[in-house]
Each structure stands twice: as structure tokens, then as C-alpha cells.
Amino acid sequence: MSIITVHDKQFQPYITAADIQQRIAQMASEINRDLQGKRPLFIAILNGSFMFAGDMFKHITIDAEISFIKLVSYKGTKSTGNVITSIGLDEDLYGRTVVILEDIVDTGKTLSMFLPQLEHQQPEQLLIASLLHKPDAQTHPVKIDYLGFSVPNKFLLGYGLDYDGLGRNLPEIYQLVD
Ligand code: HPA
Ligand code: MG
């Protein structure tokens, strides 16, 4: 692996594909152990989490379902501020064990605004699995139950993460060269 250029910026290798795969297998085995008999519903947040969700789900050996949603932010009223809504969530979450699959928790803003809407449906358990977390970027509290890698507050690319639409297809994760 070496430095790559995407649009106008340079990125250097940061997490190898092998390390990503190994960590995801470990996360999946924790989930298999913890959620045995719960028939969890995984909810993957598009677009970024599609690779993580696919690779994670291959390692899930307990009975489980998966659904893919997209979060959309739109301008609310003055009093509500920005509002987050989801597209594609058809399942009833009442009494279910739900595992949110995220590529990255950065500021935590979107998730912290969206999670109460899921809680409103009264799932038995609402868990978060995130491949990446930038603790130094976080401004809104989000409890991560299963974490892949804690990373510094630098722009990342690859394995689902894009820079202006490009780079999602890279099997490894790159970091912006500054
Ligand atoms: N890279 C790409 N997309 C992102 C990032 C990042 O570092 N953080 C939040 N979305
Ligand atoms: Mg993006």
C-alpha cells in the first residue's frame, strides 16, 4: 500500500484490510456470544456502513435479521432545529434486540438525534456497533457497545468512507496527509 490521490487530496495507508477483517471477526464473535437466542435485528446506516455491515453479517452465526436505512437531515422549524428522519425502516422494533451498524461515530450528532426515535418504538435493547470512533471529534454523547478502532480526529477514506463520493470501494482505510 502506498500514498493515493483522490480528487485533490493525498491519503496514506492507515488500517490494512487484514486488520479490519480481523477486528470485525472479533466484534462479530462478541455479538454472537452476547445476543445468542435474541434474534437481533441489525440496522445498517447507509451509505458508509455498507461494507462493514456486509463483512460483519457474514460472521454472525446466531439467527439474525438485517435492514438498511438512510438518514436524512432536513430543516425543521425554529424550535425543532434540524430534524433527522430515516428512509427504509419497515420493521417494528417493539420488544426487539436492535444493533445499529455504523461506519464511524464522528461528532455523534446525527446518531444522538436519531436514536430517540428508535427508542420511541420500545426495543428491548438498542445497541451500537461502530467500526470507527473519533473521540476527539465527538460533541454529542453516543454510547458505543461494540467498537472496532478508536482513531484520531483526522479525515479518513476507504472501506465505505468517501471523500466527496469517491474512495468507498477501497478495501483498506486511508488517512489524509496533512
Ligand atoms: N471520512 C469520511 N467520512 C466521514 C468521516 C471521515 O473521516 N467522518 C465522518 N464521515
Ligand atoms: Mg461522506
Image (cartoon, rainbow, N blue to C red):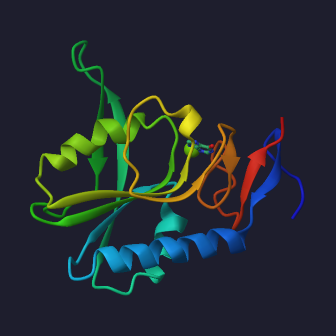
Q: Is residue 32 above or below residue 177?
A: below
Residue 176 in percent (x, y) is at 77, 42
Residue 101 in percent (x, y) is at 41, 60
Task: Please tell me in which quarter of the rendered image ligand 2 is found.
Answer: top right
Residue placed at 36% from the left, 45% from the top?
A: 71
User: Disc count in the image?
Assistant: 0
Residue placed at 41% from the left, 51% from the top?
A: 144
Residue placed at 29% from the left, 41% from the top?
A: 114
Query: Looking at the figure, which quarter contains the C terminus?
Result: top right
Query: Looking at the figure, which quarter contains the N terminus?
Result: bottom right
Is 47 situated left or right of 69 in this image? right
Is 84 situated left or right of 95 in this image? right
Judging depth in this view, the residue of 35 and 2 nearest the camera is 35
Residue 17 in percent (x, y) is at 70, 70
Judging depth in this view, the residue of 126 and 88 nearest the camera is 126
Dividing the picture into quadrants, the one containing residue 24 is: bottom right
Judging depth in this view, the residue of 128 and 46 nearest the camera is 128
Q: Is residue 119 above or below residue 101?
A: above
One can see residue 155 in this view: yes
Q: Is residue 157 above or below residue 19?
A: above
Residue placed at 68% from the left, 47% from the top?
A: 156
Residue 142 in percent (x, y) is at 38, 42
Is 57 situated left or right of 166 in this image? left
One can see residue 89 in this view: no
Residue extending farthest right: 2
Is 10 situated left or right of 32 in this image? right
Residue extending farthest top: 78
